[in-house]
C-alpha cells in the first residue's frame, strides 16, 4: 500500500469516526438530563469540529485551516467559560430564592 493510499484510507476512517462522534454528541445534547450535561455536549461539538477541520487540512494539504481550528478552540473555550458562569450564577440565584422562601414568616 502506497503512502497516498494509506493517507486517504486514514482520512476516510477519521471522518467516519468523527461523524459517529458528532451524531452521538447530538443525542447526548438532546437527552441530557441537566444543563451542565448539555454544555459539555456543546463543548464536545466544538472539539469534534476542530477535529474535522484538522483532518480536512491534512487531506487538502492546505494548513491555513489549522489557524481556523485554533480560533475555533479559543471561541469554544470562552463559550464554555461563559456557560459555566451562567450555570453558577443561576445556581446561586436558586439557592438565594429558596432561602428567601424559608425565612419569610407565614402570615
Image (cartoon, grey):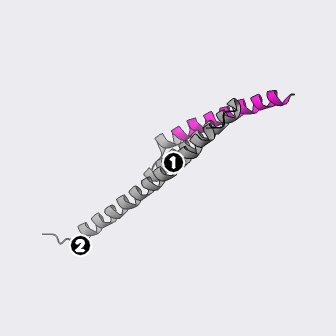
Tag of residue 26: none
Of pointers 2 and 1, the one earlier in the residue sequence: 1
- The residue under the point 49% across, 42% down is 29
Pinpoint residue 9: horizontal percent, then vertical percent.
Answer: 76, 29
Magenta segment main secondary structure:
helix
- Which stretch is magenta? 1-26
Relative to 5, residue 21 above or below: below
**Residue 44 in sight here:** no
Q: Is residue 13 magenta?
A: yes
Relative to 106, residue 75 above or below: above
* 49, 42: nearer the viewer: 49
Closer to the camera: disc 2 or disc 1? Answer: 1
Residue under label 1: 76
On-image quarter of the N terminus: top right
Pinpoint residue 64: horizontal percent, then vertical percent.
Answer: 62, 37
Label 2 SS: helix
Residue under label 2: 103
Pinpoint residue 76: horizontal percent, then vertical percent.
Answer: 51, 48
Amino acid at each position: 500500500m502506497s503512502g497516498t493510499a494509506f493517507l486517504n484510507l486514514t482520512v476516510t476512517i477519521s471522518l467516519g469516526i468523527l461523524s459517529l462522534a458528532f451524531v452521538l454528541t447530538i443525542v447526548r445534547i438532546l437527552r441530557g438530563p441537566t444543563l451542565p450535561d448539555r454544555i459539555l455536549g456543546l463543548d464536545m461539538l466544538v472539539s469534534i469540529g476542530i477535529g474535522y477541520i484538522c483532518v480536512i487540512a491534512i487531506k487538502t494539504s492546505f494548513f491555513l485551516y489549522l489557524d481556523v481550528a485554533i480560533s475555533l478552540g479559543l471561541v469554544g473555550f470562552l463559550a464554555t467559560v461563559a456557560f459555566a458562569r451562567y450555570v453558577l450564577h443561576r445556581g446561586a440565584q436558586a439557592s438565594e430564592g429558596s432561602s428567601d422562601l424559608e425565612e419569610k414568616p407565614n402570615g
